[in-house]
Amino acid sequence: MNNSGDIRLRAVVTETLLVFRARVGAFLLVSLLLSLPYLLVDLAPLPETVLFLLEMVLGLALDAWSIAAFVLITWSSMNPATDVVDSISGFLRNSVRLIVPMVLLLVVMQIAIGIGLFLLVVPGVVLFTVWIAAQPACALERRGISASLLRSQKLTEGVRMKVAWSALVILLLAVIPSVLAFLSGSLSVTAISFLAGVVLYPMSTIAMTVIYARLVNLDRPGSGSIA
């Protein structure tokens, strides 16, 4: 895979699709496995309060686990020569250790970006652009919350206008399943929302990891390794 420093939208989209195609089975299987528990809870005949709390807690944990696993799969695909696990069980086992820091990072990012999007949209997009490499940095460099956010802030410095276009596309990919879920009023729409999430959630994480790798290469030209 091309690990250059080209962070233009077309280059990012092209490599994202190449990575997804190269490991489509791994991405879809992990996405399906980690989405099923949430779907089962969503369909369970539980009181609304209990259902809300379960979905919130389980959703955060599964999102964090999924993102960590997708980052590891993407990195393995982009850097086949590195000493990274190369099996579904290995990806799941290694990523489960990252759930707690990734959950905390997601909470901070979602609250801050959510407030920005709610107020004027633009501040939320700006924050997401600045923090676009935080999740891969957390998973690959084993950084904490503030260190991951600062790492992304440093990597995107001076190139945020170029990164912003990719950030917008990633936000749209993440929003589509949520919108479908919100509109779901029948089993068929719920199924469509579920399947859309299984495909689109990995794509958004792949894109963020591709951007992270290219930003690392810009930060340290010629380097394909984790900083």
Image (cartoon, rainbow, N blue to C red):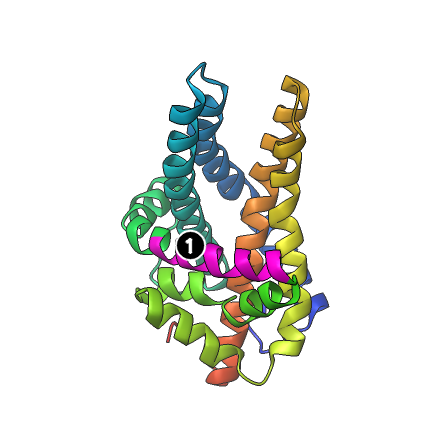
Q: Write the residue at 54% across / 61% down.
A: 208
Q: Position of residue 106 (x, y in %)?
A: 42, 54
Q: Residues within 10 Å of mark 1 (few under 14, many from 20)?
A: many
Using the image, determine if residue 83 lies above or below residue 28. below
- Range drawn in magenta: 104-119
**Residue at image location 60% in from the left, 68% down from the top:** 123
- Please identify the quadrant where the C terminus is shown: bottom left
Residue 188 picture location, percent across and down: 67, 20
Q: Considering the numbered disc 1 on the image, is that residue within a helix, a strand or a loop?
A: helix
In which quarter of the view is residue 195 placed?
Answer: top right
Q: Residue at x 30, y 44 (%)?
A: 93
The residue lying toward the viewer, choosing from 201 and 23, is 201
Across and down, in percent, residue 47 comes to 42, 18
The residue positioned farthest toward the right in the image shown: 10
Along the viewing direction, whichever of 203 and 170 lies nearer the viewer: 170
Q: Main secondary structure of the magenta part?
A: helix
Looking at the rendered structure, the kind of residue marked 1 is Leu
The image quarter containing residue 223 is: bottom left
Disc 1 target residue: 106
Judge from the rendering whether residue 225 lies leftward or rightward of residue 165; answer left or right.
left
| Count of number-bearing discs | 1
For residue 225, which quarter of the picture?
bottom left
Q: Residue at x 40, y 75 (%)?
A: 150
